[in-house]
Amino acid sequence: MSNLIETIKGENFTTISDRVFEHDGCIVDIGCLGWEWTKIFINKKRIIGADPIEDNELDGTELYQGLVGPFNGKIFLNIEKTGIGASSTMVMSESNLKECDMISWKNFCKLYNIDKISILKINIEGGEYPLLNSMDIDDFNKIDQIAVSLHDWINPKWTNLTKSTLNLLEKSGFESTLTCEAFGWYLALKKY
C-alpha cells in the first residue's frame, strides 16, 4: 500500500505516491522551470526535464531546452517574466515572440532513451491537453504516475478538455484524484 507525499513539503500541488521510490523508472518533468518540483529526486532517480525558459541544468538532471508536445517543429511563445518566475503562452506564429523547438513525446523518449517513467509531471500552461492526447496506450503503459496541472482554472472554456483528458487517463489505466483545486492539479496513478 502506498502513501501520498509532497515533493515540496506543505504544497499540495506536488502530491505524489511514495511508490515512486520503489518503481525503477525515471522522473520526467515537463515544465521544469526552477526544478523545485523535482529537487527531492536528485541523486535518487534519473531526472529529465523540458522547458523552453529554463537554462540551468542542475547536477543530477538532464534538460531539453524546448517544448514537448504533439508534433516536431517550431512554435512561438509569448513569455511573461514576473517577480516569482515566468510563464509562457503557446501561439502558432506572431512577430516579436521567442521561437522555440517542439519535439513530439515519442521523439523525446527516443532522444533520452526513456522506457520506464516513475512520474511524469506536466505543467505547461494549457499544452498538457494536446500533449496527453497525442500519446497512445504504449506511451501510457511506460508511466506509473502522472502529476498534471489541467489549466481550465485559467480558462474555463477548457473544462470539456479537462473532462476528456481525465477520461483518456481512466481509459489508459489510471485513477485520477484532484490534489490541488486552486491550480487544477491531478495525480493519476496506474491501477494494478
Image (cartoon, rainbow, N blue to C red):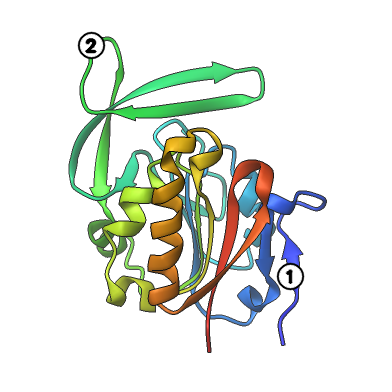
Point out the image quarter for the N terminus. Answer: bottom right
Number of the label disc, if any, that sits on residue 95: 2
Q: Quadrant of residue 168?
A: bottom left
Asked if one can make out residue 142 in the rendered structure from this viewpoint, the answer is no
> What SS does tag 1 mark?
strand
Q: Residue at (51%, 36%) from the top-left corner? A: 56
Q: Earlier in the sequence, mark 1 or mark 2?
A: 1
Residue 188 in the image: above or below residue 53 = below
Q: Quadrant of residue 132?
A: bottom left
Q: Residue at (34%, 30%) from the top-left corner? A: 90
> Which amino acid type is shown beneath numbered disc 2?
Ser
Residue 43, how many percent across, how many down? 63, 63
Residue 47, how many percent across, how many down? 51, 59
Residue 41, how many percent across, how many down? 64, 61
Residue 86 in the image: above or below residue 73 = above
Residue count near mark 2 (Cα–Cα under 10 Å), binned few <14, some 14–19, many ≥20: few
The residue at which mark 1 appears reads as 4
Q: Residue at (43%, 21%) from the top-left corner? A: 79
Residue count near mark 1 (Cα–Cα under 10 Å), binned few <14, some 14–19, many ≥20: few
Q: Quadrant of residue 114?
A: bottom left
Number of the label disc, if any, that sits on residue 142: none
Residue lying furthest right:
10
Tally the marks: 2
> What SS does tag 2 mark?
loop
Q: Nearer the viewer, residue 95 or 163?
A: 163
Residue 50, how many percent across, how many down? 42, 46
> Which amino acid type is shown beneath numbered disc 1?
Leu
Q: Residue at (38%, 43%) from the top-left corner? A: 127
